[in-house]
Image: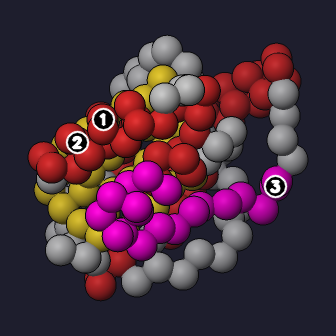
Amino acid sequence: MKTAVIFYSYEGNSVLIAGIIKACIKADIYEIKTIDTKKRNGFAKIAWGVCQVFMNKKPALQDLSVDIDSYDLIILGTPVWAGSPAPAIGSFLNKTKISGKKIALFCCHGGGKGKVFSKLKNLLPGNTFAEEIDFIYPAKNKDINELKQKIDQWLKLL
C-alpha cells in the first residue's frame, strides 16, 4: 500500500511524528508550510492561533506538489489549535481534492484534542477513515522508543 503522510507542524511535534511514521512504513512525507513563517511565542502565539481558528482564517501556503491519486493511504497530521485542526490544514484541504481514499489521522496537543478528528472528517467527505491517534507534546517526550512503539502499534491497525 503506497502511503503519504501529509502534515502541518508549528512547534516540531507533528514533524517528529511524521518522521517516525516514515521510518516505520517507508511512507512519503509532505510538510504543509505557510507563507507567513513568523514564529510567535507565549500569549501572543495563543491569541494569534485562537484568532486564526475562530475567524476561520485560511493562511496562504508555500507550494506543495503531491499527487494524491498515486496514494492508497493518506495519513494526515495536525497540531490542535483551540480544539480544531491548524488553519493551514484547512487551507491545504480547500485547494487539494482528496476523495475515495483511506485516511488515518493524528494530532499533537498540549492536553486536549477537542473535536479535531470530527472536524477533519467533515473537511474530507467521500473518504474512508481508518484509525486516529493523538500525542501530548511528543517533542518533549524523553523516551523516543515509547513514541515509536505507540506509533508502530497504531500503524498495525491500519
Q: Which residue is mark 3?
A: 36
| Residue 60: quadrant of the picture | bottom right
**Residue at (54% x, 81% y) in the render:** 65
Disc number at residue 150? 1
**Amino acid identity at mark 3:** Asp
Q: CA distance from mark 2 to mark 1?
A: 6 Å
Q: Which residue is mark 2?
A: 154
User: How far is the residue under mark 3 from the one under mark 1?
Assistant: 33 Å
x then y, percent, for residue 68: 35, 77
| Tag 1 secondary structure | helix
Which mark's residue is nearer the viewer, 3 or 2?
A: 2
Classify residue 13 as left or right of residue 149: right
Q: In the drawing, does residue 43 fall left or right of residue 139?
A: right
Q: Is residue 10 above or below residue 45?
A: below
Give the numbered dot on residue 60: none
Residue 28 part of the magenta segment? yes
Residue at x 30%, y 64% (from the top left corner): 25
Q: Tell me: 38 left or right of 4.
A: right
> Looking at the picture, which amino acid does disc 2 mark?
Trp
In this picture, which residue range is highlighted in magenta? 19-37
Q: Residue at x 67, y 60 (%)?
A: 33
